[in-house]
Image (cartoon, coloured by chain):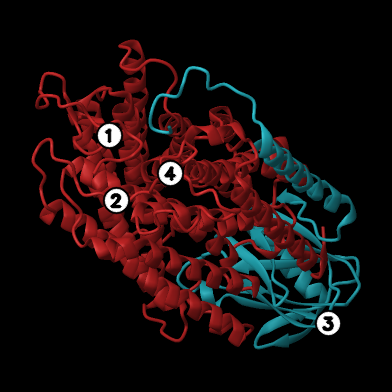
Chain colours: A red, B cyan
Amino acid sequence: MSFPTLNPPPPTPQPGRETGLRKCATTGLDVCLAAQRFIKLNAVAAIVFLLFGGIAAILLALTRWQAVHLLRVDWFYRILTFHGLNMLIFWMLFFEIAILYFACTIPLKARLFSRKIAWLSFGMMLTGAIMTNVVIIQGKADVLMTSYLPLLAHPLFYLGIILVAVGTLIGVFNFFATLYVAKRDRTYEGSLPLVTYGATAAAIIAVVTLLHGAIVMIPTFAFSMGWISQPDPMWYRMIWWGLGHQSQQVNVCAMVSVWYLIGQLTTGSKPVNETVCRGAFVLYILFINLASAHHLLVDPGVGSSWKIWNTSYAMYLAVLASMIHGFTVPASVEMAMRAKGWGRGIFGWVGALPWRNPAFSAAALSLVIFGFVGGITGVTLGTQQINIIAHNTLRITGHFHSTVVGGTSLAFMGLAFYVVPLMFQRDFIWRKAARVQPWLFGGGILLVSLGMSFAGSLGVARRTYDIEHAGVYGPAAHLFLGIMGVGAIIAVVGLLLFVVLCVGTVFFGERHAKGEPMADWGVAKELPGAPGEAIFADHWAMKGTMVLTGVFLACFAVYYFANWKALADVWYVR
Amino acid sequence: MSISIPARDWFKPPEGAEKLWIGLALLWCFVLSLMMPYWHFRGKQNSRGEAYAVAPVAFMERTEAFVAANKTGERDGVPIVEPAPGGDAYLLARMWSWYPILKLRQGESYRIHLSSGDLQHGFSLQPLNMNFQVLPGYDHVLTLTPTSKGEFTIVCNEFCGIGHQHMIGKILVE
């Protein structure tokens, strides 16, 4: 069975080494063999770091769940440092390099610019990540992921992060060079595909982000070596979050690109309006930098006007971009379904979606969790004054577990259900379990996120080993920490299942001979007498999406103003 | 098609429902942007980030002078200090304590000076859940007006080493 949306390949001869490309028998895509090797390497490394982070996650959740309180205090902070770096930095960056290599070669029928540069990038990133992890586990860097000065870690901790950042920058350079060569050699005619366009936006933001990383980490490394005096802690916070928060915007861009990609692969969707989707990516590039302000809203040394401007500049146009994607992604899927004949009522198309396809369910859950939980809480907590009742509480952790984990990680997992067979030319093992995996992981992380958010609303701090000593938290706070713990168990089971499925497929999946298509996960079916493309003439046809986004806006407004009310109830401060 | 080259004529203005949504979203972003300046002038809770450079040693000396001048009692070896209404009060964060215990009056305003003698700390007033960052080298001034009475607990919510979770302080309001 072939995908409905991609042209099945003509019966071409076997791939030749001379072109450096092979044709995928299932999708008809031209796969660059050099890119394939580095997509494999980076994706495998990413999944190993995801596994490390996941093991750490369950240890942490079972410690903060006070009834269990698993780890010793020193190991709690050590594992917390380990968890943050492996999940937020290593898993994300390695997988993003894999996505970049995919986006600049395969859709453009192009060849990777340089194998040597790709090796250099991968080697530096891997060395840096291993170096950092070893230093942390040795107990020489109990400084948490942010390593706020004057806290000081072993110099190799900083050197490891610098190697990862520079290695990633080199990989991003390879991406841009590949784009340039593809354009020069005319491997494609016209504009970039939307997925490549989104990946390019992610790459541009990544350059700015990683430069911040270099600016803050190199002096800190020099200080840890005793070469210079201590950099200012406030300066450190400002620049560090230029790395820490902006890298999450890279994730957002990559995730949105993956939504569009999975939408096409599973339902045959196409953007209702390319200009709108591309314009929204441009808004990300222009208006999402300097996001470090969100972490400095209750800090000394930066004033009200600085805080207000930098948390909202140019009228929240980056939020606008996310709200646009939040409409265009479901709208494109809805229109594809209506074109296939599922046009009854407002939500008649929803039941016919390929829910049993794990890539689709992962992307759909990712969109809902990212939008309804992550997006709404993010904008609200990032409001200058509301941050007073949120800063450094578990509300913050609840927010970013629904953006980075429920949003980005889940979308990346969904993509893996297509990328692993495409790259390794093996069928997924244990397909029934694969269909359940996104629901386990997504459901679990949703509980984690809600448990954290509500506990944080009751004042429970993030990054703390024990809340009993304060003597101010009642049974409600413990209930929510328990919900977080149960959610973490479910999510980590989903994560381990994902790792088992991927690793099992790489080693034991049924190998497919050349030219033989692979098993399909199941895609949206077309009804007889479907209206087809004609439906696109009606610009008001996406009624389900209009209702969904209307509900979203209402939830947003209720949550936002409820927080202003909660703020108005605390002591006066200025 | 997201993964394929788009048709040549892809550049089109938004229409219909998409246009409506962009308009609504932009309007909402406008509301979001206006709320913060509005609250800055009309709201009672703002984080202005008023701060002055201070060496940790100098801040400790000021705190000691403040304690010596205004001490009214002691609890578990920590002085209880009652600043004059409208006056300055000093609160020193160190690994792993808040010094001293402040005794305030409901409805009166105080200039609370927050700073650290060592690492970064987090001032988290419970059960109100008001949170501010405390940095070494920065004298962070909060003009605070308690609007409720009772015993309030300061929790440290910025990681500051192995004893972080034991860093608990008190503010008493009469």
Residue that mark 1 sits on: A121
Task: Locate residue A304 relative to residue A114 in the image: left or right.
Answer: right
Between B29 and A530, the residue placed more toward the observer is A530
Residue that mark 3 sits on: B149
Q: Look at 77% across and 74% down and name the residue there.
A: B68
Q: Percent from the top left, x then y, of residue A552?
A: 65, 55
Residue that mark 2 sits on: A417
Alpha carbon separation for disc pair 4 and 2:
13 Å
Residue that mark 4 sits on: A263
Mark 4 touches mark 1? (CB < 8 Å) = no
Q: Percent from the top left, x then y, of residue B48?
A: 77, 51
Say whether mark 2 and mark 1 are on the same chain: yes
Chain letter belonging to callout 4 = A
Q: Percent from the top left, x then y, of residue A170?
A: 33, 30
| Rendering quarter of residue A445 | bottom left
Between A573 and B11, the residue placed more toward the observer is B11
Q: Which of marks 1 and 3 is in front?
A: 1
Chain letter belonging to callout 1 = A
Q: Quadrant of the image for the N terminus of chain A?
A: top left
The amino acid type of the residue labelled 3 equals Lys
Above or below: residue A475 compared with residue A269: below
Q: Which of marks 2 and 3 is in front?
A: 2
The amino acid type of the residue labelled 4 equals Gly
